[in-house]
Amino acid sequence: MYLTNAEEKALAGERGEALEIAYRVHVAIGKLGNAEKLVPIEWAHVSGVSYLTIGEYGLDFLKKLSSSKGAKFKVFSTVNPCGMDIENWESLEIPRDYAEKQLEIIACYKKLGIANSFTCVPFESYKVPRRGTSVAWAESSAAVFANSILGLRTNRESAVSALACALTGKAVYSGLQIPSNRKPSKNIKISVKKHGDFSGSLNFGILGFFAGKQVPGVIGFQGLKPKLSLAEAKSLSAAIGTLGSSGMFVLDSKEKVETIEFTDRDYEETISDLSQSEDGEAVIFGCPQMTLEELSDLSNAVRGKHFKKRCIVFCSSMMFEKAKKKGYTDVIQSAGATFVRDACADFTPLISSLKVGSVVTDSAKGAHYMRKVHGINISLKDTRTIIEENTA
Ligand code: F3S
C-alpha cells in the first residue's frame, strides 16, 4: 500500500506511539484488502465503549493509547453507546465496580477528543456530510445506514480500525470506499404475501436479518416501496449488520445478479429463530437507540396509559433533551417507562440485573443480542402490538 512520506514517518514512530500503532493497523488492514492507498475521512465513529464488551484488556489498551504521545483524534469523532446511563447509573442499580470501569473508558475517549455522543444513531445528532464523502464508522447498523441511505462511503470498521482512522484522519481505501464496489452482488426479491404492504420497523428488521445472513456483499432489494421511513431504514440497516458482513444495501436494484426470494416461509423461519417466547416479563425499546420521531410516536401511543410491567427506553442524551423540550419524555415517563440514556440496549448489565427470564422487544438486532449476551428468551413483536398488550 502506498504511503506518503509523512505517513511513512508516522509509521516509523517519528510522530509518537499512538500514530505508529494507528498506521500499523492501517498497513495490516491495507495488506489484507490489497489496498492501494489511504483516503482522508471527515468523520470517525468509534465503537468498543461498553466495559461489558471490551473488558479489562480493552480498558488497559485505551489507557495506554490515550496517555501516549501524539494521541489525539484528528477528525470529528463520535462514539457508540456505552454500558450504562452515565448520569443515573446508581439509581438504575448498576454495580459500582462496573460503573467505575465504564467511567474510566469514557475518560480515555474524552482525552482522545471524542464528541459527547454515546449514540449508535450518530446521523441524527450531527450534520451529515455531503453524499460521496468518506467516513469511517465502526457501528455496523450506522455504517450500513451511512452507505445505503446517506450516500457516505465507509467500510464496516472494527473498534480498533475506527480508532486508527480517528487518530490519523484517514481510512484504508478498499471495499465500500471504492465506488465500483458499491453495486449489489445479489438481489433479494420480496415475495411475502401475508404482511400487507410490507412496512413498519419490525418487518424491515426481519427482512434485514434474513438478507444479512444470505448476502455477504452489497444487497440489492427488489419489490420494496421506494422510500423507507427513518425507523424502517434504521431497523433494516441494524438487522443487516447483525450477522454476516454486508455493509450496504441498494433499494430497487436493477443489477442483473443472482436473485434470492424472501418468502412468507423465510419470514416465519426468521422470526421464530429470533423469538422464543409468547410474551416477555419486561419491555425493551431502543436498539438502535430511539430517534426523536420514534419518541414522538411512542409518546402518542402511550399518552394516558400505563405500562403493566417494567419498560425501558434507550436513547442518547441528545435525543432525550430534544424530546424533553417537546414534552415526549414526560408523557412516556408518566406511563411508567424508564429512560436509559447513552447506553446500548444489549451490551449493558442492566438487562441481566432486571432478573427476568424473558423480554419483549420490537428490534430484530436487540432480540439476537439480548439472547446471546444475557441468555434470556425474547418475544419479538411490532411496537404497536407491544404497547397494546402491555399497557392499560
Ligand atoms: Fe445500538 Fe447497542 Fe443496538 S449499539 S444498535 S443499541 S446493539
Image (tube, rainbow, N blue to C red):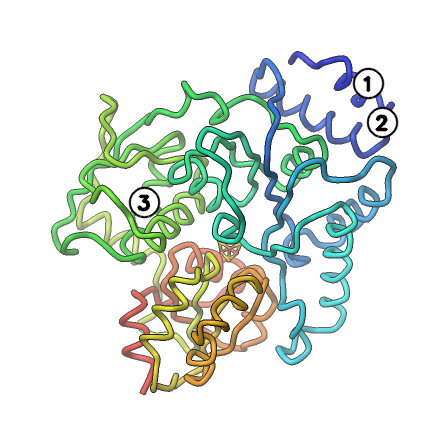
Q: Is residue 13 left or right of residue 73?
A: right
Q: Earlier in the sequence, mark 3 or mark 1?
A: 1
- Asked if 325 appears above or below 370 in the picture, the reply is below
Q: Are marks 3 and 2 in contact (CB under 8 Å)?
A: no
- Asked if 8 appears above or below 263 in the picture, the reply is above
**Residue for badge 1:** 9
**Residue for badge 3:** 210
- Of tags 3 and 1, the one toward the viewer is 1
Q: Earlier in the sequence, mark 3 or mark 2?
A: 2
For disc 3, the neighbor class at 10 Å (few under 14, some 14 to 19, many from 20) is many
Q: Secondary structure at mark 2?
A: loop
Percent x, y for residue 301? 31, 75
- Of tags 3 and 2, the one toward the viewer is 2
The residue drawn where x is 85% and y is 27% is 15
Q: Is residue 15 left or right of residue 367?
A: right
* Tag shown at residue 15: 2
Percent x, y for residue 282? 44, 76
Percent x, y for residue 359? 42, 71
- Pointer 1 residue Cβ closer than 8 Å to ligand 1: no
Q: Secondary structure at mark 1?
A: helix
Give the residue type at disc 3: Phe
